[in-house]
Amino acid sequence: MSTAAETRSTEELAPVATETLAELLVAKDRPPRPSALSTSITFGWRAILKIKHVPEQLFDVTAFPIMMVLMYTYLFGGALAGSVDAYVQFLLPGILVMSVVMITMYTGVSVNTDIEKGVFDRFRTLPIWRPSVMVGYLLGDALRYTIASIVMLAVGLAIGFRPDGGFVGVLLGVALLIVFSFAFSWVWTMFGLLLRSEKSVMGVSMMFLFPLTFLSNIFVEPKTMPGWLQAFVNNSPVTHLTNAVRGLMDGDWPATEIAWTLGWAGVFIAIFGPITMRLYTRK
Amino acid sequence: MAYDPKGPAIETAGLVKVFGETRAVDGVDLTVPRGTVYGVLGPNGAGKTTTVKMLATLLRPDGGEAHVFGHDVVREADAVRSRVSLTGQYASVDEDLTGTENLILLGRLLGHGKPQARSRSAQLLEAFGLTDAAGKQVKHYSGGMRRRIDIAASILSTPDLLFLDEPTTGLDPRSRNQVWDIVRAVVAQGTTVLLTTQYLDEADQLASRIAVIDKGKVIAEGTKGELKASVGAGSVHLRLREAEQRPEAERVLAHCLDAQVQLEPDPVALTARVGTDGNGEQAAEQASRVLSELARAGITVDNFALGQPSLDEVFLALTDRPAVATADEEVVA
């Protein structure tokens, strides 16, 4: 039947070994259904493989955070705290929060560009826990947040940041930040699925992230702000998170702020998780 | 629906999907027996892909019912998913990952342990002649290689039902033949295959039953023989040496075949339908009779071809003469 195959050579491809294939197909037993954790980790591995193949995408978790630390420390340091050295003690935990929370928007961008590809049809026909695709993205992103945090801390230490909380305090601060960012990213998975183009995802993200991160206690104490702004700033999840991270890195245990932060994280997942999954199932 | 281990692989009744104003699938009834290749034949936009997506639990039907191995595709989607695999019209693999990574990823998602996923991937890549390309990102693969890795991804765990949505669209003839070989190997091991295609010869090569679908409706269903009988076995295509002889040739053909003769835009070419009862042998006999009659009339034939009916001809025949179509009722039952 396929005599043409022997005479023509349009592709340098080895022939299909149909006998071997037949043997492989005889194995009918399907393995047991994998757990939600296992499939989520597998999707996380997929995200890491993508970073491995396109390492340039780490630019936004390396160059961007370095720029943020240097720019704001030297720009505001003298004016706001009298010296760069004094300001960096205050600013670094905050700028860490700001950068990582801003980086979360790339989750939405990558979901948006990825979701139209044919491979999602296959993922959706697998008998697996459905949210694991999204959780996988976020696990991959958690790695990116970790890289960004390490880079910023290294730069901070180099320019004079000396946290009183020591290694453990810094570690706890970063861990809390990553937990919050993981939860917060569900906002962007939703927008990634909802909006039609990568550009609109970026646009919407910036519109939310700029006010959310700037209208906080990251750069200055809210005391000098007008009352209505203080009301917003003091109740913003970013302020709670910044207070908690600052406290932990300072060697304190800011229990209330940690509780607020985790509470907000829970709220983000509870609201945007189901919306994301609804959109994903319908896509 | 009670589960019947020998019942059909797929059973749909009045399946409907509406996109805005368009009724993409408009009351499709299908019964696909187990262990066979079932062809769904139709032009672009006929509703083939939409039907497959509903059966593979990717789209929710707006009306009607569909059962896969007795499981409702909406209410028991997970049970359906554990029995089927889908190879989409466009590569359903991750183009940014390598061949090996794709297969291991899917192997793990199907519940294989790491070593199993690894060894099964390597074996499949070898069987599909992709060992050399295993470490390359799929986006650098040729069309034929993509289809192979795509099908390999679909059989990491041998599925009971494999959906192949236009598996050879855009492939060169050689790669096409190889995909056909793979489909035959898969079905030989007992997997049911639902194949959608725009090509009659593909359905002819692989499928035992065929549903012809147009504008979201099944317009004919039956075995290959039944379908061909409704269309005629094919056409004779003639190219004459002299354009002046064409009117004479047309007369001979019309007389010989008792069929409408079509004059092609090329002034030396003409086409006529043969073998209206679908008997291939008779079509050949008719063709040879035509040739000798033409020779007797002193007409020089430069080129002669006996072709299968094209999809266009099938549609023309089916939509012009719906009575000939082999019983839509049969599928409803």
Image: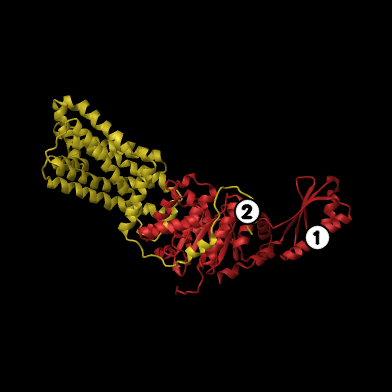
Instruction: Tell me, for residue B288, which label it has, or none.
Output: 1
Q: Is residue A213 left or right of residue A118?
A: left
* B330 relative to A115, above or below: below
* B330 relative to B174, above or below: below
Give x and y (percent) for residue A197: 41, 41
Q: Residue at x 64, y 54 (%)?
A: A4
Q: Amino acid at mark 2?
A: Glu
- Residue B82 visible (yes or no): yes
Q: Nearer the viewer, mark 1 or mark 2?
A: 2
Q: For mark 1, name the chain.
A: B
Q: Is residue B69 left or right of residue A42?
A: right
Give x and y (percent) for residue A251: 11, 42
The colour scheme applied to this rendered structure is: by chain
Q: CA distance from mark 1 to mark 2?
A: 31 Å
Q: How many marks?
A: 2
Q: Nearer the viewer, residue B332 or A55?
A: A55
Residue at which label 2 appears? A6
Q: Colour of chain B?
A: red
* B50 relative to B83, above or below: above
User: Image quadrant for the N terminus of chain A?
Assistant: bottom right
- Residue B61 visible (yes or no): no
Give x and y (percent) for residue A20: 51, 61
Q: Is residue B268 left or right of residue A261?
A: right
Instruction: Tell me, for residue B185, which label it has, or none.
Output: none
Q: Residues within 10 Å of mark 2 (few under 14, many from 20)?
A: few
Secondary structure at numbered mark 2: helix
Q: Looking at the colours in the rendered structure, which chain would you say is drawn in yellow?
A: A
Q: Nearer the viewer, residue A28 or A237?
A: A28
Q: Amino acid at mark 1?
A: Ser
